């Protein structure tokens, strides 16, 4: 029997029934729940099943949601429920967030300056996702896999050294990942059933207190309408930790919805150009998954005296120190970094982590591997940014300042870079 791949898809509305606080901008503190739904948010579900030549079945699940991430504290139970109901191995379930900074907070483990999680919304979200999986499992059909690679230029590197200080400014000489990867799935009749789009750019265009799927969600809506026939298009956010949207070559965080739409239209146009050209067909292989929990090392932990000295701070350091004093079990020298590699076809792999990877990692991994590797952050939870050793020496938001917003007990140790690179390559090319 020849190897076959089946794919079932679904798209479910995960817009809150009632307004909730948004995640991603501390500037929204005190503004309360969002005031308007500018772009509804969705979870796009891709259920894969593969039959090998010996008749053995394997399965996996990929969900791309218009969320900043999935809260680590809830991912385990949700994956267990999915595995129990549909028999998909837990390690083969990828819950991915596009990293929109205009969607609901999904974790209660971080500073409230990043937005408060609403438990009722989380219950609704998970119920909607489970219903969507049921729909996708009933939609399975044989598909062929095709891939294409191009470029898109929406972003700029956002770290720049000025008089020895790392500033959040456009840096045309900094690492920038402009790779645009697309995976198209066609039914046996030739109809496009689904498209996966992998690109790296922070969805931080508009800080307005309005609900939005940001430029990536807008692009997916445009693509779905243009392709037609019920095709589902899923955005997979890459290593965008230090790559931000750029307007006239400069960073901006005060864009309007017109800017969001313009960026979405630009990305959609780049994807459509790829889809109109010749794509490379890939043979079907077994859906295999490899996963590793890397104990990501931290620098020296703060003492109780150091924490006590910061409790009077009225911003994030005060909140951070009080949290660690109240929860000393969080004072650990390592954080669990989950790295998962899912083989989707011959020459096509997904590498996903529960972190916010900077662009340098994506560029390095792709330079050291063959075929197409879709590198995803914001998957199956979130622990924080993964900077490079050089960035840790330079300081700045990604390396140092962000750690307190994520309630990390300390910044990562410079050894993190080599450990992450080694683990990723080990999983990709065992």
Image: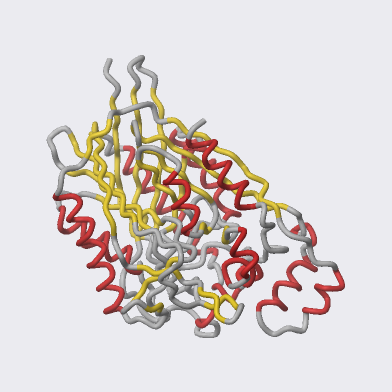
Percent across and percent down for residue 359 are: 46, 59
349 and 315: which is toward the camera: 349
Would you say 62 lies left or right of 427 here? left
Would you say 368 lies left or right of 346 here? right
53 and 351: which is toward the camera: 351
Residue at horizontal 55 percent and vertical 80 percent from the top: 162
Percent across and percent down for residue 147 are: 26, 42
Percent across and percent down for residue 246 are: 36, 74
Q: Quadrant of residue 283?
A: top left
386 and 318: which is toward the camera: 386
Query: Does 152 sit above or below residue 297?
Result: below
226 and 129: which is toward the camera: 226
Percent across and percent down for residue 92 are: 47, 37
Residue lying furthest right in this view?
305
Residue at horizontal 78 percent and vertical 79 percent from the top: 311
* Figure disc tally: 0
Residue at horizontal 29 percent and vertical 77 percent from the top: 259
Q: Quadrant location of the N terminus? A: top left
| Colour scheme | secondary structure
Query: Does 398 sit above or below residue 232?
Result: below
């Amino acid at each position: 029997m020849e190897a076959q791949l089946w794919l079932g898809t679904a798209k479910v509305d995960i817009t809150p029934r009632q307004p909730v606080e948004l995640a991603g901008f501390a500037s929204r503190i005190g503004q309360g729940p969002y005031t308007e739904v500018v772009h509804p948010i969705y979870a796009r579900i891709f259920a894969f099943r593969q039959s090998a030549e010996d008749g053995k079945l394997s399965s996996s699940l990929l969900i791309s949601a218009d969320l900043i991430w999935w809260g680590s504290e809830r991912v385990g139970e949700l994956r267990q429920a999915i595995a129990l109901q549909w028999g998909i191995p837990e390690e083969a379930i990828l819950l991915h967030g596009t990293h929109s900074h205009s969607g609901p907070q999904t974790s209660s483990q971080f500073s409230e300056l990043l937005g408060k999680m609403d438990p009722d919304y989380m219950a609704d979200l998970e119920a909607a996702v489970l219903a969507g999986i049921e729909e996708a499992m009933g939609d399975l059909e044989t598909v062929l896999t095709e891939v294409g690679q191009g470029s898109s230029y929406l972003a700029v590197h956002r770290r720049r050294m000025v008089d020895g200080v790392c500033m959040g400014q456009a840096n045309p000489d900094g690492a920038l990942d402009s790779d645009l990867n697309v995976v198209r799935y066609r039914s046996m009749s030739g109809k496009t059933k689904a498209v996966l789009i992998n690109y790296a750019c922070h969805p931080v265009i508009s800080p307005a207190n309005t609900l939005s799927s940001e430029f990536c969600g807008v692009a997916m809506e445009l693509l779905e309408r243009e392709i037609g026939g019920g095709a589902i298009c899923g955005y997979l956010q890459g290593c965008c930790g230090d790559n931000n949207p750029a307007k006239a070559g400069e960073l901006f965080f005060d864009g309007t919805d017109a800017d969001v739409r313009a960026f979405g239209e630009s990305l959609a146009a780049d994807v459509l150009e790829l889809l109109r050209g010749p794509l490379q067909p890939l043979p079907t292989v077994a859906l295999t998954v490899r996963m590793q929990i890397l104990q990501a090392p931290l620098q020296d932990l703060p003492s109780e005296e150091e924490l006590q000295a910061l409790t009077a701070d009225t911003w994030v350091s005060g909140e951070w120190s009080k949290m660690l004093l109240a929860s000393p079990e969080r004072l650990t020298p390592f954080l669990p970094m989950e790295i998962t590699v899912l083989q989707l076809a011959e020459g096509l792999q997904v590498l996903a982590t529960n972190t916010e990877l900077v662009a340098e990692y994506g560029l390095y991994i792709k330079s050291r591997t063959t075929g197409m590797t879709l590198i995803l952050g914001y998957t199956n939870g979130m622990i924080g940014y993964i900077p490079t050793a050089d960035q840790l020496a330079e300081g700045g938001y990604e390396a140092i300042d962000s750690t307190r917003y994520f309630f990390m007990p300390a910044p990562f140790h410079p050894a993190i870079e080599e450990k992450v690179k080694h683990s990723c390559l080990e999983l990709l090319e065992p």
